[in-house]
Image (tube, rainbow, N blue to C red):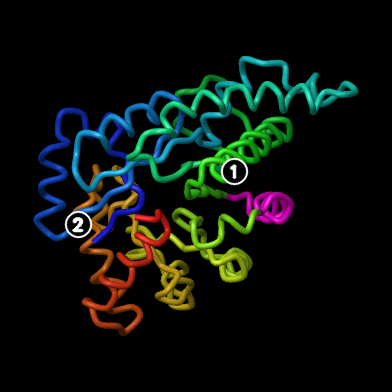
């Protein structure tokens, strides 16, 4: 099986990678994608992928971590003065280019996780964290640039969307490239019909995580998602189906068993189809 989204590059797994990967392989989870969330974790994702067989990397700047750039710049004045958006785009493009060395690794299969996020995080390393429209606009600029990067280098796209559906769909409709068809996923997809319809129309995949085990609304949503569109992800160390921290890639097995029961499809078919989907998604 395939864990399409697992943060082995996070501190929770420091010094434990060999054991974590071995435990996953013991239940036939033998392919894993490790997404970056900023420049540092992207580099680390590549280092891990290059060390372990069956492990791949994605590189990107998560919308939450765009705040660090936002807080150190005068973004609001860019938007309030004439000609400012072009200057902002140039600066954004320059930061995103720093991902290129990591993107060029043979083990890097995607740009991600990238996207839009209007959620107000109670726990964050960023001081004075706030979600205002200037911050959201900067997130959009970063997302556009990173989508361009994925298309330019022929990589897949891992999209993070949290409480920003309308912004996300509007932006994707503006910048969508047909080369992303079959190569993009809504990571940990919110249970939303519009997101599903967009995904169907653009041949995207839907990522389902351990929260489906205890979230009834998500269960109803996943029942409507065709098996041909589903990929499994743990989002480790978060979203454990067992509600334990840290989550691990071995728990893909728990998710598979639950989806088998939920959709009334044999476990074998669920495992085989979602693995096939993941390999298509990442062109592996």
223 is higher (above) or lower (below) than 138:
below
Magenta stretch in the rendered image: 163-176
Q: In front here: 279 or 261?
A: 279
104 is higher (above) or lower (below) than 208:
above
Q: Residue 244 in the image: x percent, y percent?
A: 23, 48
| Residue with the mark numbered 1 | 147
Q: Residue 32 in the image: x percent, y percent?
A: 28, 49
20 is higher (above) or lower (below) than 266:
above
Q: Residue 246 in the image: x percent, y percent?
A: 24, 42
Question: What is the residue that sits farthest to the right in this orientation?
Answer: 82
Q: Earlier in the sequence, mark 2 or mark 1?
A: 2
Q: CA distance from mark 2 to mark 1?
A: 29 Å
Q: Residues within 10 Å of mark 2 (few under 14, many from 20)?
A: many
Q: Can you tell which of label 2 and label 1 is closer to the viewer?
A: 1
- Quadrant of the image occupied by residue 118: top right
Left or right: residue 138 versus residue 120 is right
For the point 45% across and 70% down, the residue is 229
89 is higher (above) or lower (below) than 267:
above
| Residue with the mark numbered 2 | 29
Left or right: residue 230 versus residue 6 is right
């Amino acid at each position: 099986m395939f864990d399409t989204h697992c943060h082995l590059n996070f501190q929770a797994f420091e010094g434990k990678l060999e054991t974590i990967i071995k435990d996953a392989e013991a239940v036939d989870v033998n392919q894993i994608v490790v997404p970056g969330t900023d420049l540092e974790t992207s580099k680390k994702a590549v280092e891990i992928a290059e060390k372990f067989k069956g492990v791949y990397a994605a590189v990107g700047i998560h919308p939450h971590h765009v705040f660090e750039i936002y807080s150190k710049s005068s973004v609001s004045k860019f938007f309030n003065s004439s000609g400012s958006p072009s200057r902002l785009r140039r600066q954004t493009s320059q930061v995103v280019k720093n991902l290129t060395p990591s993107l060029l690794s043979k083990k890097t299969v995607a740009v991600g996780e990238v996207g839009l996020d209007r959620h107000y995080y109670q726990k964050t390393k960023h001081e004075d964290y706030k979600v205002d429209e200037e911050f959201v606009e900067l997130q959009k600029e970063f997302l556009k640039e990173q989508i361009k990067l994925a298309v330019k280098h022929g990589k897949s796209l891992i999209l993070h969307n949290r409480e920003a559906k309308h912004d996300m769909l509007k932006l994707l409709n503006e910048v969508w490239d047909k080369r992303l068809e079959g190569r993009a996923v809504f990571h940990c997809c919110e249970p939303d019909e519009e997101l599903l319809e967009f995904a169907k129309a653009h041949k995207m995949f839907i990522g389902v995580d351990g929260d489906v085990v205890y979230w009834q609304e998500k269960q109803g949503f996943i029942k409507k998602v065709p098996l041909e569109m589903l990929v499994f992800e743990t989002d480790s160390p978060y979203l454990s189906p067992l509600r334990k921290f840290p989550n691990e890639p071995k728990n893909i097995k728990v998710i598979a068993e639950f989806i088998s029961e939920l959709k009334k499809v044999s476990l074998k078919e669920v495992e085989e189809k979602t693995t096939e989907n993941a390999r298509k998604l990442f062109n592996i």
